[in-house]
Image (spheres, rainbow, N blue to C red):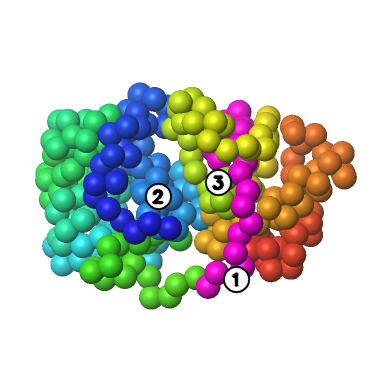
Amino acid sequence: MAVFSEAAAKAHFASNPGPRGAGWNQWCQWAMDDLCGLFGRDTRNYETATAAWQASPIEGTDYRTAPAYVFHFLGLPGVPAGHVMYAMRPAGERSISTGTPAVVPEQWGHDVGITSVADYIARKGATYRGWSRNNGVNTVFPPADSTPATTTTPVKEEEPEDMNYIIRSKNRPHAAILGGEFKRLANSEELSIVQKLTPVTILDKLNDREYDVLRAIATRGAGVTKSEVQAIVDKLADNGVTVTAEIDLDAIADAVNDEAAVRLKG
């Protein structure tokens, strides 16, 4: 997994029109999820910045003393979802944030770009909630010359087998599991590129529960083996489970090795 790079982050957001193709405004937590997926560890989705804040180990409540490469959480008047941004400099300076040009002056395109925590608070009347190196259980791996985002590094227990899947669900974005890693596909062009680059197995018409389980396995940190994903597919077929049925997480956990079962249930 690559460590954080401002140039790579800018390229991603400049070419990505947002989760619904209409810009990133009001999609701050999704943007942070993208950063974790691209440059760190992304094992769980949070619906809002407030939910991620509540699940994060808050390390300080004064942004002026915060180090670089941390997440800053804010409250917004009348907006329970809150706001979150990722700062590349100490004291909340040079922070990646979603918002219109009126709120985020240095635009990378599509209502996302660079501001500071202080400026955002002044423009939006926000309240400061705290900073953390984590976004919930997720994180961004900072450049090598900066303070590590975590004190421990997950041990990779086995090498993932080569595998490529496209996964689809009615209420989830198209995504791929490439070489054992989950990648959200921003648009039909990216989907077409994946289909042309390598033979893939298309897991089509998944329900949201099935999609989320596959994503959880693929983003657990140590990768996912072909046998694990195949075990889920086989389990569904063996039990005659249709793609519209609810999936029993315990049944899926039983279909893979004990170690994976612990991760699924945890």
The amino acid at mark 3 is Leu
Q: Determine whether label 3 and label 2 are within 8 Å by CB.
A: no
Side of 104 relative to 150 (left or right): left
The amino acid at mark 1 is Glu
Q: Position of residue 148 (x, y in %)?
A: 31, 70
How many numbered marks are there? 3
Can you tell which quarter of the image residue 142 is in?
Answer: bottom left
Per the rendered image, the range of residues in magenta is 155-176
Which numbered disc, 3 or 2, marks the residue closer to the eye?
A: 3
Q: Residue at x 18, y 34 (%)?
A: 107
Residue to which mark 2 is pinned: 38
Residue occupying the far bottom of the picture: 151
Q: Quadrant of the N terminus?
A: bottom left
Crowdedness near tag 2: few (<14), some (14–19) or many (≥20) residues, C-alpha within 10 Å: many
Q: Position of residue 197 (x, y in %)?
A: 53, 36
Crowdedness near tag 3: few (<14), some (14–19) or many (≥20) residues, C-alpha within 10 Å: some
Crowdedness near tag 1: few (<14), some (14–19) or many (≥20) residues, C-alpha within 10 Å: few
The amino acid at mark 2 is Leu
**Distance of label 1 from label 3 (alpha carbons):** 19 Å
Mark 3 residue element: strand
Residue to which mark 3 is pinned: 178
Q: Residue at x 45, y 72 (%)?
A: 153
Mark 1 residue element: loop
**Nearer to me, 29 or 121:** 29
Q: Position of residue 122 (x, y in %)?
A: 12, 44
